[in-house]
Amino acid sequence: MQNMRLKFLLPIAAFVALVVVFYNGLYEDPTRVPSPFIGKQAPAFELPSLQNPAEMVTEETFAGQVSLFNVWASWCPGCAQEHALLTAVAAQHGVPVYGLNWKDERSAALKWLQRMGNPYKAVAYDRENIVGIDWGVYGAPETFLIDSKGVIQYKLIGPMTPDIWQQEFLPRIATAREELANGGEG
Amino acid sequence: MSRLLACCLLFFAANAWAIDPSEKLPDPEQQAMFESIANEVRCLVCQNQTIADSTAPLAADLRREIKRMVVEGQSEAEIKDFLVERYGDFVLYKPRFRSWNLLLWVAPAIFLIIGAVAMINIVRRRTQLPIDEDAP
Amino acid sequence: MGPLDAPVDTTAWMFLMVGTALIHSLAVTEKRGLFKSSTLLLAIGAFSLSLLGTFLVRSGVLVSVHAFASDPSRGIFILAFLGVVIGSSLGLYAWRAPSLEASVGFKPCSRETFILANSILLSIAALVILGGTLAPLIYPALGFGTISVGEPYFEIAFLIPMLPLVLLVGVGMHTAWRSMEPAQLMKQLRWPAIIAVTAGVILPYLVFGSFSLLTTLGVIIALWTICSALLDPARKITGKAPRLTRGMVAMQLAHIGLGMTVLGITVTSSYSVITDEGMKPGDTREISGYTFRFDGVRDKQGPNYEAIQGLFTVSRGEQPYTELRPEKRIYRVQTNPMSEAAIEAGWGKDLFVALGESLGAGAWSVRIQHRPLIRFIWFGCLVMALGGLIGVSDPRYRKRAA
């Protein structure tokens, strides 16, 4: 008899479990594609610099420091939106910012930097979206946090906001810098 | 979210498909492999479309890369691996036969077995009961 | 046909499965007082699925172009509503359903058994579709990473319970209530089976010239359903009749409709030709025995749009067949061009031509489609609906004057 009762409770038990899953799901954005690179080595690349085509920018450029790699373009409204904040927080905390100019025209990109200000220590020019695809970039802006060993610690999809900087970037930057101080190069 | 919406509104407005026939690969076998892969890859901007159907620039870039790999002679599995390495399992429309994905593929068969067992039990029990009591 | 948009299309689909199971299970409950708790659960399930559909599509938990903005408060409201309505129904079910058990029985070869199989298989189909729809939500929640489930999965996963089901429909229709001699059943079904298998193997090969196992299976099963449904009407015509009640006619029509839809789906998915071509004026392409000649474009003014209209002359062999004029329209209220396809519709097939992009020098990218039996899909549904209407009009459902 107990056995019989049990099967009638199954539907409502399953439903309750489902409601829990749905409730959690409401606070996630399903269109965000999480990066498979978190915790992995940043992909190697070699691109000409935006400002000086003769110079090459590679993954070696970030080596030995905790840095941000910001994907941007002159046609991207979100990039303009985050630009001031990105410049300010990077300067405030002494975090070097490198840029990946994504699917853009060189002249338009240079003009944009002139107008908005240039926070980047170097900008790689990825007109054809070769490196973008290698890094799993699917839109702009995106920002990667890379530690001193070249491992990607975090990827932000969308514009930087003060909350995200506080909650996601600062703690990880602190941890990465501690490691750098303790472990030295490596 | 608004990126997704804007892109898909554009799709419904333009209602054009994306593979330009003038871009076809000269080798028909390679073209067939390319089309078959493109129809199974999700466009990450317009996430309810394949890159074969999507007019998004990223879809065009991914089609270009896939064509390059097809011409280089890479296998379908290698090309899919390439994409999944960079964008995760989400990028493929058909979940692959890998650990937890297996559960999804095996589920119909499991349900059938459970259903069959339930069926046998119920019929067995009913067979033993008297055919008629009073009419309902 | 466009890509499957998971929450929207799949919820309607699931609802259809459970609703169908419900109406068949109701027949048993009405006739014999059996399956009361399953019928109840199916009824709760059907309504729950329609509510669930609203939630899944609009709340934004799943990727859909129809989702409202990303703020979760709308979703929370719908979820709360869901929780109250479905939770209380299922709670009531858990509490009271155990006392609904009837104590009559039936033999293995009986209509009750077939309707039981029907409920089980349809529920499996609905569960499988539900699993596929919710996987992108559940997998990350359990820590298995993201997963993507689209058409390729649903098509295959759905067929697994459905093919056996449609096969059983043809048998169950002729099974008596309570008990029947299997040998007698087999004897009745002999002719429909022979006709279906023979026609199913020969016809696709004759008409389309190619043979594939899955296609043949689908065609045989579709024809089997139709032939089985026509068995009693055929016997009536040849005089060996049982009396055909309105209820029986309704059932036969509904199942004929099912067979037609399955036939349409099988044939069109196996034998459709969809191709993208670059064509200059004067170019021809031969698709499935029809020759399409591109005769160039011209400008056209519509009531609220301006258009570029292409002209395609279609012939079958030497005989001219039809002209198709697809357009690219720019409606004056917007700037994006809309492609207006030209479709020649018929019972046996649809021909479809649409203009893509101009390739320069008078050449255009063009999509041409040949879709055999595609109208059968919709027509089959109409026939099913007609069967339903006739069933509803059965006088036994009218309230008896006191």
Image: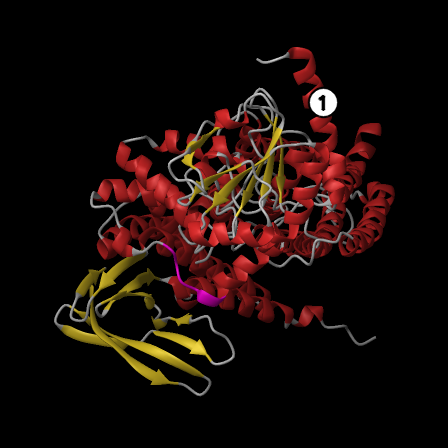
What percent of the width, then of the height, locates residue C26? 69, 55
Residue B8 visible in this rendered orientation of the protein:
yes
- Look at the picture and state if C362 lies above or below C288: below
Please name the residue shown 60% across and 42% down the image.
A119
What percent of the width, then of the height, locates residue B24? 26, 50
Q: Main secondary structure of the magenta part?
A: loop
Occupied quadrant, residue B31: top left
- Depth order, front residue of B24/A44: A44
Which residue is the extreme one toward the bottom? C303
- Look at the picture and state if C212 lies above or below A46: below
Please name the residue shown 71% across and 39% down the image.
A89
Occupied quadrant, residue A156: top right
Circle 1: residue type = Thr
User: Any magenta on residue C140?
Assistant: no
Chain letter of mark 1 equals: A
Indicate left or right for C133 with C151 as reference.
Answer: right
For mark 1, what is the residue? A175
* Element at label 1: helix
Residue C114 visible in this rendered orientation of the protein:
no
How crowded is the residue under tag 1: few (<14 C-alpha within 10 Å), some, or many (20+)? few
Q: Which residues are magenta?
A: B13-18
